Image: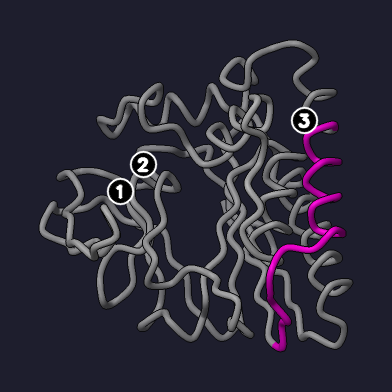
Amino acid sequence: MTLTLTVSDEVRALAPGFTHVVVEAHGLVNGPSTDASSALLDDAVRRLAVRLDGRAAHEDPHMAAWRAAYTAFGSKPSRTRNSAEALAKRALSEAGLPRINLLVDLYNAISVAHLIPVGGEDIDRIQGGMRLVRATGEEDFVTVAGGEEIVEHPDAGEVVWRDEAGVTCRRWNWRQGPRTRLAEETTSGIFLLEGMAPMTAAEVAAAAAELAELLEKFSPGARIAVNDPVQ
């Protein structure tokens, strides 16, 4: 791995059941969504429906664990859902899943099929390493509202991913900032899969392995490394 990711002791104390797996890839080929990536998203929705078997996404034990973690750091999980629950809710609605670009489609498909938060960042846009910390409230989070770039600040105690320049994702995995997201010109990416007990480390690893296979399929010749689960 060329990029360092660390989880603070404060976050580990907040959520001792947290596990993450990192997939790092170089030599990626991105671009607009394709029929093939769209078909993967459609298949992921079918897999999600089988998994839920008529339940709402938030009733899944894994999503319930994420809701408990959000509540523990002062966030309202019914208003600011973790990324997997938000995607699942949209997948099962009339709106359906968005088609963003090829790489985002791939990791969204894994997120929905496995009901696990998955994020993707452009390594070349990350400054220094990435850290999962509880915010002081003074960090910068650059986002876009009404077509204009604005700077927000997380709540004190909020769990955020950040690099040396500021926050890259608020409320753990709720909202990613545009600075480091995967764009169509991205060639090097890091993909983060995040599980919470009762999801096991083996289940997180299986989702990561499937994502790595998709990245290899859609970017032949890419250099892909999958780390062991970190608990």
Look at the numbered disc 1 and give the secondary structure of its residue: helix
Counting from the top left corner in percent of width and height, residue 220 is at 87, 83
Magenta stretch: give its range. Answer: 27-46
Look at the numbered disc 3 and give the secondary structure of its residue: helix
Q: 169 or 89: which is nearer to us?
A: 89
Circles 2, 1 touching at the beta carbon (< 8 Å)? yes
Residue at 34% across / 44% down in the picture? 171
Up the image or down, 111 lies above or below 94; here it is below
Q: 112 or 178: which is nearer to us?
A: 178
Counting from the top left corner in percent of width and height, residue 21 is at 64, 59
Inter-mark Cα distance, 3 to 2: 31 Å
Label of residue 13 in the image: 2
Counting from the top left corner in percent of width and height, residue 107 is at 68, 56
Q: Residues within 10 Å of mark 2 (few under 14, many from 20)?
A: few
Q: Is residue 43 left or right of residue 92?
A: right
Residue at 86% across / 50% down in the picture? 39
Q: Return the residue at label 1.
A: 10
